[in-house]
Image (cartoon, coloured by chain):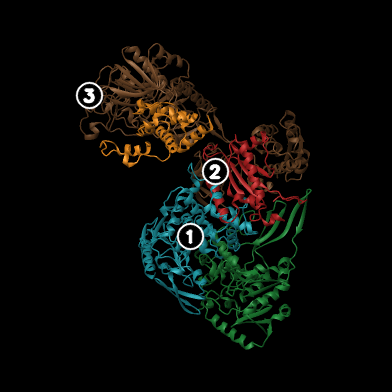
Amino acid sequence: MSMNQKELSEQIISMVGFNPRQCMKCGKCSATCPALEEMDIHPHHFASMVCEGRINELLESKTLFRCLSCFACVERCPRSVEPAKLIEAVRDCVIRAKGANFLSPDAVPGKLDPELPQQAITAAFRKYGK
Amino acid sequence: MQRIGVFVCWCGSNIAATVDVAKVVESVKGEPGVCFAQDYQYMCSEAGQQLIINAIHEHKLTGIVVCSCSPRMHEATFRKTAEKAGINPYMVEIANIREHCSWIHKDKDEATEKAVILARAAIAKVNLNAPLQPGESAVTKRALIIGGGIAGIQSALDIADAGYKVDIVERSATIGGKMAQLDKTFPTLDCAACILTPKMVEAAQHPNITLYTYSEVESVKGFVGNFDVKIKKKARFVDENKCTGCAVCTTKCPSRKGGNEFNCNLDNRGAVYIPFAQAVPNVAVIDSTRCLHFKTGKCGLCEKVCSAGAIKFDQQDEIIEEKYGAIVVATGFQISDVTKFDEFQYTKHPDVITSLELERIMNAAGPTKGTLLRMSNKEHPKDIVFVQCVGSRDNTARGKCYCSKICCMYTAKHAMLIREKYPDVNVHVFYIDVRTPGKNFDEFYRRAVEQYNVDYIKGMVGKVYENENGRLTVQAVDLLADRRIMLETDMVVLAAAIEPSSGVKDIASMLTASIDTNNFLTEAHPKLRPVESPTAGVFLSGVCQGPKDIPETVSQAGAAAVKVVGLLAKDKLVTNPCTATPNELMCNGCSSCERVCPYGAIDYVEKEVNDHGKREVRRLARVNSALCQGCGACTVACPSGAMDLKGFSNRQIMAEVDAICK
Amino acid sequence: MYTIEKSKLSDLFGAISASCELYLPVKKAGQNNFTKYEAGTEYCDELKTVKSPKDMFFPQSENIVSFEKTDGKIKVTPDTIPTEKTVVFGVRACDVASFDVLDRVFLSEPADSFYKARRENCTVVATACSEPEESCFCSVFGIDPSEPKADVATWFVGEKLYWKALTEKGEELTKAVASVLTEENADGTVEAEKAKIKEIVKNLPLASLSLDGWDGDATEAKFDAPEWEKLSASCLGCGACTFVCPTCQCYDIRDYDTGHGIQRYRCWDSCMYNDFTMMAHGTPRPSQLQRFRQRFMHKLVYFPANNDGMYSCVGCGRCVNKCPISMNIAKVIKAFGGDKS
Amino acid sequence: MQKVRGLVIKRAGELLSDGTVTRVLGYKCGDFFYDVTPAFFESADQLSDLEYGSFCGANLSKYLINACKDQKEGKILVLLKPCDTYSFNQLLTEHRIDRDKIYVIGVGCKGMLDIEKLKAMGFKGITKVLDNGDELDIKTIYGDKKCKRADALLEKCVCCKGKDFKAFDEVIDVEEPGEKGADRFEGVALLENMTSEERFAFWNNELSKCIRCNACRNVCPACSCMKCVFDNPVSGAAGKVNSNSFEEKMFHIIRAFHVAGRCTDCGECSRVCPQGIPLHLLNRKFIKDIDELYGDYQAGEEVGSRAPLVNFTFDDAEPSIVHERGNE
Amino acid sequence: MQVNENAKEWKPLIVAFCCNWCSYAGADLAGTSRLSYPADVKIIRVPCSCRVNPMFILKAFEKGADGVIMCGCHPGDCHYSTGNYYARRRMTLLFSMLDYLGIDRKRTRVEWVSAAEGQKFSLVMNDFAKTITELGENVKLGDIRCKK
């Protein structure tokens, strides 16, 4: 693992505040995930890939922006690993690297689907850069 | 005044290389009480011990100090030596001048000086030593088994066969426990009832065994060899001696709305019932919470139909008091609560069941008479999904952090039995790991895969929901293929974690036995004393100590029985002589000591004392030396210093402090 | 007669302490006690010290002999007899009288060498009580607080201290500190002060106490009196009264293991304690009633019986102030009917 | 106060006459207004000597230990102030007294007065104090004086624990549940905020006055041992005297330690100390530590509660906390 | 303080109370592993840390100890299951009181040392001895009579 990768890995672990080595690779996060088919790297891979320091692969993963932050995986993980937090942490790494070019309120379409949950809109602000 | 001999060991060069042993000998000669001092190459050798024996005889020694290795090494050796020479073994003290001195200090002067100080401390202590005699207590030749499952039955039979009286206390109306609910057993697939019921009958008929079913332990007092136990025999409202088990009442009872616990509430039973056909004792019991007679004062149908006249609505709970020498805890397990796992729809959909429920469905005496049916529509299923580790290996608040150990094997059994009986049913098992350590276990699992085509999929199930076809969709991931699986099925069977039976906490606190964070009873030593609890005279049998399968339970039950027999075989128990003793004239009776005693060894008596001519009745602490393990917690809790510890008395320790600070 | 300005007391104390150790009432942490003088120490003019000055001659604890074991032999070393010259300043008349009581015990043959040495080496400077308090009853024992009988008697009047040597030792001390004193004929002032004090003393609430019936022959009449039970019922059995008392002279001798040998020391004991005069067979006074009775019988009956009728109470009133449950010798005397009023 | 005295005498007389009790444990008048002595009264006519006034600070509960043991028939009536009931409960908890032999009359309390405080204010030769509510009229040999009642309260009353009775059979003259007294830990906190050297100097100064008269111990309701370790020659700690500066500390530390978690903070130790040592500051330190480290606990609040030193939790603070907090 | 006729350099005296089951065994392991610590440390064996009476500690100081350390099983590992929990409360309060009286809190310490922690035992003793040596002679607590 290169130095940078290791540092990133440690940084992610410190951001999430738990030890991803608690993961016992049961796959319940992926099994639970409603957006699994959209993802290239599945949630259950995140814990081991972070531990192994395969951060570059994760940084380029589509998964980061397919995750709905619905927290179903967090709810159901039997090992208190909270995969969504891991994904969020990797995503933060990407966003930090990009600078502060987050989505501005102007970019929000005038007419939003009223069914769209508020949480999803807020999440969108955080997630999608220009 | 003691006549003390000091023996300084060279331990070859281990001590002699850094400690000037001759100087130690010289330095201690002027110490109070010392009338002999000598060094020798190996004190622990035959010759060294003989030297001590000779010196004891020659100099009429009353106390011995050996300056040598750690007392944890050879204290017992030198105590025996002293005993051989005719002095009390507790008149020996060890000054540890090897591990605590010669091995850690390089400077010879420094090490020698320290060795002298350590020797002086030991001498100061011996000066205050008193001969100690291990106490003796009688043993009641009767054992109590708490729990009448296979563990309890097996322990009881083994103890009874060895010739001792045994009582089993079982809180439900029949013995048999969880095993009686099982259909078949792995890995042999023999019928559980076929192997269990003969044992139940044997226990019931054994001349040395008394069964107290529908009973609970009310209180436990006393100590190893001498437990005083109160057992509450709950009112059955049926005269056990008159009831013939004809079951007429059970069929006539009009109150049939309540669930049948034996069938996991998958069907109903009457308010008067016999748990199952082979119940032991085969006697009906009236559930007063459901019985119309108790609720409305009317009905009484059972009374009318009972030809034996066994119904007794006025029966009362009965308290039985009995003395026991040993107690075996065999309280077993229960299925943990799976309702917290709402992703599996257990509470919402009748076709999502636990494995124990499946056992009942598969059993000929079960709610479906042994036919595999969906509980929702009573149709034959086409697909069945098994979900492993529901609540096991789960460190969140919902689950248990441990592996329940038996689920992998019973799921393989279920899968195999279904495929055997209904080859048209597809069986899928979602697993995290398949754990099969055990004789013929892995072979058994492989047979399920290879011969019965059971579909094992690695990956936990994410969620289960009812789909538009009226079937269940299981959403999961095949971790090996790394792909999503959406599987339509008719039934979902959850391998729920097992946990210690409710009520084990109360039992543990009554017995002052400790439990771990999962409520499993703690063993005295995890490897070397696995069937004993830390409380003397209390033994552990079966799942109450940790998850295990039937053969393991039976072997542990046997092991516990052997320990019990070993205890009951003794006429007298020898107790640790280094126990706490209260000074009656100083005791305030304030209860401080009782509160810190981890063994419940202290109680209080009203006793007349003669305090320098003043006679009065006082409340005094009394230590049961058979229970006391000599920790000394009470000696410090006691404000007046009335409580002292033999072998480590206040004065002895203060004398050591004094000697060291000289 | 000599005088010194109150504001110049420190000069006097400086002069005294130049040649010997000076002890005087000093307030420390809120309490007035006899304390060794050091430059800057301030005299406290409160009427009573908590502890009496008996510490001067009979300290609460003193080493008397030590034992050491070397090479199997025991070496006995008696503590040396104190030789320091001391002066104690500010002793009240009652406390001065208490020295006579203590002398009876410690100076009668065989004399206590430690006590004797300290007593002989000490010059007592007494001070008249210009403001006696409600708890004082020295007059009952024939003590006149306006005219203390010590080596030197002093009076504080106005802004001056009046100084009069009464004994040879007193003369000697006066000579030694003459440089800071002024010779003055002030008999008139002092006599007026005495008269004032006498007037106050006459009207003190406890002045009416009567010792009728208390003497060396009263054992039989008093010993089994029913009053003792009521009086002693609330006694806590602490030693506060005995330790503040100027005349209590009982002591215990104990050994202490120093680690290098044994230090034998003598310390005050209290007849109120349940291990007082403990012997191998136990204590001769197992109940608090017996111990309580002992104290007062000793002061008012047994002591007079052995000392020509001298009571071993001087009416200082310390016990009146300090007893935790306010039981005291005045109440005892009254309970037996000893009130003239 | 005369009114309360009247009520107490009337009620005690009734209870003696109807046989409910055979003895009354109260206070007896002395020569002065302030020297009240605890006393037993066995008949209604003896009650004329019963005193109940502003100087009845003494806590009578300890006397019940011996009173319960004597062979006399019938119950003992005891007068307890609200704060005394804590000690009473603690004694019950420790099985030192027998509730069935005792009849408790709780007497309402406005705070008791401290003669030492009056003397410290400079009043000499006090012969009488008239309690006029907020103000005191002080008669002395040297003339009449006045002072505020609040300035003459006993330390324990300044930090009053409240007007609730924690045990009683009946009550007389109940006070409104007014505000609690001053913060009782103020003095402790003051010391805690000093430097180690200042604290050492403070305690050296105070404890060096100790004359080992054992008044603090003998009055203390928690110090009810049959034989105190300091009186017991085999305890290794026996001593009659402070032969050195350590022994007085040893005595007071061990005494405070032995009553830690059992001390009801009744303040008797400080009240009776002939040398005015603020011993309550030692006990309150333990109480403060216990409250802070193991959760609030008031000994004597309820009968049968488990004292903090015979109790624990798995996640108690480590002893190193002492090293981590406070001043150097 | 140790009396040394030749008045060599001052050396601290440290009394260590060790429970029989863990810490005494830990000290034994330090010995078998030859992990040295200063000879100033003298160990007194007690069955359990809950046997250590505050009086023993004060007595040690009175008689001239410069530091007192108590070692027991780690909380949860007590051979008698709960002894060290009581000891923990007792020592915490005692040390706090000593500190309150202005007595160096650094002279007292509690460490949990298991039977497997020979290394830790040695490190703890080295560190404690160093602390005590830096603090110097115990003047605040010593007994006058012992100083003769």
Q: Residues within 10 Å of mark 1 (few under 14, many from 20)?
A: few
The residue type indicated by label 3 comes to: Lys
Q: In the picture provided, is D68 more to the left or to the right than C117? A: left
Q: At which x and y percent is residue E33?
A: 66, 33
| Labels 2 and 3 share a subunit | yes
Instruction: Label 1, secondary structure: give it.
Output: helix
Chain A colour is: orange
Quadrant, the N terminus of chain B:
top right
The residue marked by circle 3 belongs to what chain? B
The chain drawn in cyan is D
The chain drawn in red is E
Q: At which x and y percent is residue C10?
A: 65, 76
Report the residue at 43% width, 70% height from top.
Answer: D149
Q: Which mark is residue B298?
A: none
Q: Which residue is mark 3?
A: B252
**Relative to the observer, which residue lies in front, D35 or D193?**
D193
- How far apart marks 2 and 3 lie (CA) works out to 61 Å
**Relative to the observer, which residue lies in front, C270 or C70?**
C70
Q: Which numbered disc, 2 or 3, marks the residue closer to the eye?
A: 2
The residue marked by circle 1 belongs to what chain? D
Q: Which numbered disc, 1 or 3, marks the residue closer to the eye?
A: 1
Q: Which residue is mark 2?
A: B633
Q: Residues within 10 Å of mark 2 (few under 14, many from 20)?
A: many
Q: Quadrant of residue B359?
A: top left
Q: Can residue B606 be spotted in the picture?
A: no
Chain B colour is: brown
The residue type indicated by label 1 comes to: Glu
- How far apart marks 2 and 1 lie (CA) works out to 34 Å
The residue marked by circle 2 belongs to what chain? B
